[in-house]
Image (tube, rainbow, N blue to C red):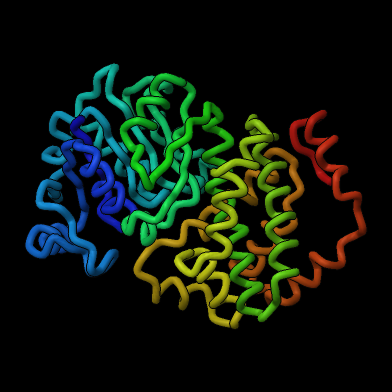
């Protein structure tokens, strides 16, 4: 198939290489001309994936019309906060057919609209909802590019199209499952970044395994609680896009969101941390959107609120942890009964 990969960051390059291995014709679009020039000349991106060779068969251009030419699949691998802008440019450049597949690989929620990435794409692209799918799961580019065994999910409301995406991406080291619950998958992979920031804060404060285990467990409760209120299936949050992505993002040395939390926990200002980073930590923007969504659906998310206060309101990380630990005692399973009856709820 002809696949246009929009975005030449670490994940975009990794997926482009994987897809090329599967025999597809790949053309990448990259906004910044200097990155295009480097990849053309060196067949490498020293900024994102140093020492990884990009095959000559993979084209790249800063002109979107060139990259989109004759595309059967349009793969969005840009940061979540520029998905709408990129999609708008695509809709002005490319003529979609009913057979064109749109695949989102961004993880986040849009500030302001509070929409998931497939909803943003639906706003901007002249396609049916069934043509938009998301591929996501516990998958650091630094490991996938080295062919370390990885499993992800292809989610979409059309089961046949989800299976098509499964086949397009499937590799011996990259196992792809399907899931029809795109609401749950996209909500899970966005919100886990917020909990990963909290996990990094715990690392920065010098807390141990007990603390992080409790944080991830109760963080999953929050994610599930909100997701169910939004219309997702509860079981999705116990799959690869839920607990799987939460684990890898909260524990891995490759995790940008965990890194941000660690530095903030050590006492650095958020602006200073972000200014020193090459890549985007999606959880920072998603934290604001998550707090707004929790208010919209009347769902209690104390960990998410604590992360928000630390990042944006100057609250000391240790004070936020102490507040969480000293909330009124509760029944651990009480929220599950409430969520089944009401879709969410405060517990």
State the image coordinates of residue 253 (x, y, percent, origin top left). 49, 69
Residue shown at the point (34%, 49%) measured from the top left? 78
Residue shown at the point (18%, 41%) measured from the top left: 26
Q: Residue at x 82, y 28 (%)?
A: 341
**Position of 189 relative to 45 (above/below):** above
Q: Can residue 288 be seen at all in this image of the molecule?
A: no
- Across and down, in percent, residue 217 comes to 72, 55
Q: Quadrant of residue 98?
A: top left
Q: Position of residue 37 (x, y in %)?
A: 10, 61
**Left of 160 or right of it: where is 27?**
left
Q: In terms of image quadrants, where is residue 124?
A: top left
| Above-or-below relation of 337 to 138 | above
Q: Residue at x 50, y 39 (%)?
A: 116
Q: Residue furthest top?
A: 98
The quadrant of the rendering that contains the N terminus is top left
Viewer-closest of 45 and 7: 45
Q: Looking at the image, which residue sits at the far left?
A: 41
Q: Is residue 325 above or below residue 64?
A: below
Q: Residue furthest front?
A: 172
Residue 343, position as x, y percentages in the image: 75, 32
Label total for image = 0
Query: Based on the displayed image, in which of its 4 quarters is residue 163 positioned?
Result: top left
Give left or right: position of 169 versus 2.
Answer: right
Horizontal side, residue 130 vs residue 116: left or right: left
Q: Is residue 327 visible?
A: yes
């Amino acid at each position: 198939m002809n696949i246009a990969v929009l975005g030449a960051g670490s994940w975009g390059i990794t997926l482009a290489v994987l897809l090329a291995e599967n025999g597809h014709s790949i053309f990448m679009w990259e906004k910044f001309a200097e990155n295009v020039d480097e990849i053309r000349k060196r067949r490498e991106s020293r900024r994102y994936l140093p020492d990884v060779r990009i095959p000559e068969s993979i084209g790249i251009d800063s002109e979107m019309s060139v990259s989109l030419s004759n595309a059967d699949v349009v793969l969005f691998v840009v940061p979540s906060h520029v998905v709408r802008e990129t999609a708008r440019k695509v809709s002005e450049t490319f003529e979609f057919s009913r057979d064109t597949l749109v695949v989102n690989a961004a993880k986040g929620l849009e500030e302001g609209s509070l929409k998931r990435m497939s909803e943003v794409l639906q706003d901007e692209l002249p396609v049916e909802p069934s043509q938009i799918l998301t591929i996501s799961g516990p998958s650091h580019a630094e490991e996938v590019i080295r062919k370390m065994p990885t499993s992800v999910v292809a989610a979409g409301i059309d089961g046949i199209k989800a299976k098509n995406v499964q086949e397009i991406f499937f590799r011996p080291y990259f196992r792809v499952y399907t899931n029809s619950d795109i609401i749950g998958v996209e909500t899970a992979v966005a919100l886990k970044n917020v909990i990963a920031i909290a996990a990094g804060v715990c690392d920065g404060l010098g807390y141990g395994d007990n603390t992080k285990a409790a944080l991830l467990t109760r963080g999953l409760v929050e994610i599930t609680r909100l997701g169910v209120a939004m219309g997702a299936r509860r079981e999705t949050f116990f799959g690869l896009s839920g607990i799987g992505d939460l684990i890898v993002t909260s524990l891995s040395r490759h995790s940008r969101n965990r890194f941000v939390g660690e530095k903030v926990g050590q006492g650095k200002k958020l602006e200073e941390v972000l200014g020193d980073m090459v890549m985007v930590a999606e959880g920072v923007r998603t934290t604001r959107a998550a707090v707004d969504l929790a208010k919209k659906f009347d769902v209690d998310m104390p960990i998410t609120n604590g992360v928000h206060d630390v990042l944006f309101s100057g609250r000391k990380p240790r004070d936020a942890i102490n507040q969480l630990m000293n909330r009124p005692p509760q029944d651990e399973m009480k929220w599950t009964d409430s969520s089944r009856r009401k879709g969410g709820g405060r517990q």
